[in-house]
Amino acid sequence: MSGAALIVPALQFRRLWNEGRFWIVAALLTVIQIPLVIAIPPLVERFRAAFLLAFGIGDGLFVILMIVLLCSSPNAKDN
């Protein structure tokens, strides 16, 4: 789920792939994901699939929010 939370938003923001800022944010978000992936298995065993789904959705929304906030320029036009 953590991988999908990074890959799906990256595909959504293909227009930013030429910007270094996007790849720096993506790399930092990947580094943040590593401790989460290590910490999640006991919680998944305890709360089952519902927790995994909720975590995946929340994680994906967090990644999208960070990309939008950190990579969008205030004077850029939306396409």
Image: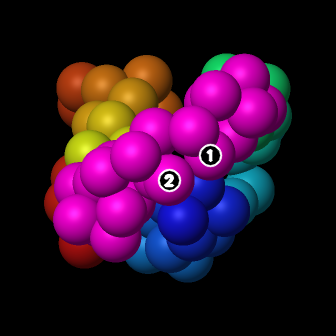
From where the camera sits, is residue 76 visible? no
Q: Which residue is mark 2?
A: 45
Looking at the picture, does residue 78 appear above or below residue 19? below
Tags 2 and 1 in contact by the CB under 8 Å rule? yes
Q: Secondary structure at mark 1?
A: helix
Q: Main secondary structure of the magenta part?
A: helix
Three-letter amino acid code of the residue under disc 2? Glu
Q: Is residue 46 left or right of residue 18?
A: left
Question: Does residue 47 appear left or right of residue 26 in this picture?
Answer: left
Name the residue nearer the viewer: 78 or 29. 29
Q: Tell which of 57 and 53 is nearer to you.
A: 53
Query: Is 43 one of the magenta-colored residues?
Result: yes
Q: Nearer the viewer, residue 62 or 73?
A: 62
Q: Residues within 10 Å of mark 1 (few under 14, many from 20)?
A: few
Mark 1 belongs to which amino acid?
Pro
Q: Is residue 61 magenta?
A: no
SS under mark 2: helix
Residue 18 figure quarter: bottom right
Residue visible at 39% across and 30% down in the picture: 66
Q: What segment carries the magenta color? A: 33-57
The image quarter in which residue 74 lies = top left
Where residue 79 sits in the image (x, y, percent)? 25, 72
